[in-house]
Amino acid sequence: MGNCFSGGGHGKFAVGGTSSDLNTHGNNDAVDNFFKSRGYNGLFYQIELSLSASNLRDRDLLSKSDPLAVVYTKGKDGSLQELGRTEVVLNSLNPQWITKIKATYFFETVQTLLFRVYDVDTEVEGQEVTTLKLDDQQHLGECTCKLSQIVTDPKRSWTTDLVSIAESTESTRPKKLGQLTVRVEVELVSKTTAELTFRCSDLENKDFFSKSDCFLVISKYVDSGAIIPICRTEVLKDNLNPEWKPVFLNMSQVGSKDSPLIIECFNFNSNGKHDLLGKAQKSLAELEKLSFSKQGENLFLPITIGKGHQSKVLKSQLFVEKFSESVQHTFLDYFFGGCEMNFMVAIDFTASNGNPRLPDSLHYIDFSGRPNAYQKAIQEVGDVLQFYDNDKEFPAWGFGARPIDGPVSHCFNLNGSSGNNPQVAGIQGIMTAYGRALSNVSLAGPTLFGPVITSAATIASQSVAANEHKYFVLLIITDGVITDQQETIDAIVMASDLPLSILIVGVGGADFNEMEILDADKGQKLHSSTGRVASRDIVQFVPFRDVQGGEMSVVQSLLAELPSQFLTYMRNNSIQPKTTLPTT
């Protein structure tokens, strides 16, 4: 699992995208693209799928079927990519295949799996199953599911009816073709994690009008000899003697304590061409010794002399201020123990969105089926998070509108009810309530986040009081800059002690620079009006226009920090995964 993150109790997954604290002059895009180009991905787990079937059709005359299962991933465009095949089980209508199918689970992505079962008519003795021509075999049935459906089930198991190819694409009455059961196992990884605090001294100054803006990249060698980055720190601005927040390295990710690691120090440049200030090569065991000795390790720079390569030793030094090891539970450990992640949404109904009846409005509903920005954000984020919520009853609010014959409300139930009943059924329920609300309210203003954050925090607080094993995610979609910034900050600081994360999507062409203040990715901790400091970063903000049409989806951008925010809350509050699985 990619499980390195940076932050002193405010852990952030440094593998992929927007998850580290970057105290820079501008956006994080250049750093993010730099790491993507060098092999970074989001939170992932290597998993194995075990398959079994029951009551399959018998397609052979003189014996029973000889079933084979094939697993595919299905793209948004319907394209199929084969993940793997089981062995052929001879003469069985209730096969339990031994061959496991390996897959990679990505938290931020909706992954659709297609399972097809065949009766093999070809002679298979001495033949690899990968060479079998599937068109020559008889189709026994198929089924599809989202990988998250299996992964988030506390029993780690999913069973469904098999259907024919035609029935999988048409709403016809299915024939009884048997059932398929899929069980998931996470490949065993070490949960031992090393925590290291690095600092450097006497770094070279690469900037003309200020000092270098420094960050570290930690990489490892793979079998091919290539170097793969596994972790990064935040950027520290104007500092030639930086000390970074702790980073956490999982032993499985590193290989072993004796595996060599490359620690590189860079000067951040907004164009993405970062300057190498120096590097060192040390194993975890050597870094541990360096910590105990309190001595520094001189950095070096590789130089080319003629056709040869040498190293120039620098006066700059790398220090390990802290080294410790501990057992860290993984993100999926909590969901295997029955934890839930509950989805909530709040929608901006202020007048700046434009008249919903006109095509240039951000709230315009196109009856051709093309979603507006609000609908797209709800659908994409909801598609990922819905599987982590057992009852799929989602609180949904609107703000900045005037209900019929009422004053402007900055937190009203999207379903039109009054009181403490904001829940709607499923993602489609949110969409339906949103459409109805556009007909039943008048767009007004101003843009206030404080009331909806407080409502979400109240639900999270009640869950804590009831000793429920839940975490909450509030999606706020807005077209403008908030006018209650300090009240919003106060609400966020109060909520930082609760099991709550806030995802904010900015839609339209507004200048959202001030919104970045709410997202503490640049090292600026939030302070309330009373001087209280947020205990952790719980906000992720993404302008919709910056990611739509690009390589990263809105979902990937928004959810990049969520696993680390979740784990930070659990670890800060000493909450362990439950080991007893639910019986129902």
Image (cartoon, grey):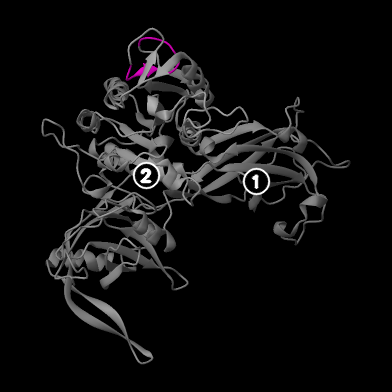
Estimate how packed mark 1 is, as few (under 14), some (14 to 19) or many (20 or more) residues with alpha carbons within 10 Å.
Answer: some
Q: Quadrant of residue 164?
A: top right
Residue 316 versus residue 157 in the image, above or below: below
Query: Mark 1 is on which residue type?
Result: Trp
Residue 227 versus residue 175 in the image, above or below: below
Q: Marks 1 and 2, Cα distance to the nearest angstrom?
A: 28 Å
Q: Quadrant of residue 141?
A: top right
Instruction: Find residue 207 and name its label.
Output: none
Foreground residue among 270 and 155? 270
Q: Is residue 55 visible?
A: no
Estimate how packed mark 2 is, as few (under 14), some (14 to 19) or many (20 or more) residues with alpha carbons within 10 Å.
Answer: some
Q: Is residue 90 visible?
A: yes
Assign a secondary structure to mark 2: loop
Q: Residue furthest right?
A: 61
Instruction: Find residue 97 and name its label.
Output: 1
Instruction: Find residue 330 and name its label.
Output: 2
Q: What span is in magenta?
A: 409-419
Assign a secondary structure to mark 1: loop
Q: Residue at x 82, y 50 (%)?
A: 121
Q: Position of residue 192 (x, y in %)?
A: 31, 52
Query: Mark 2 is on which residue type?
Result: Thr
Foreground residue among 65 and 474? 474
Q: Position of residue 434 (x, y in %)?
A: 48, 22
Q: Position of residue 29 (x, y in %)?
A: 36, 54
Q: Position of residue 103 (x, y in %)?
A: 54, 50
Q: Is residue 412 magenta?
A: yes
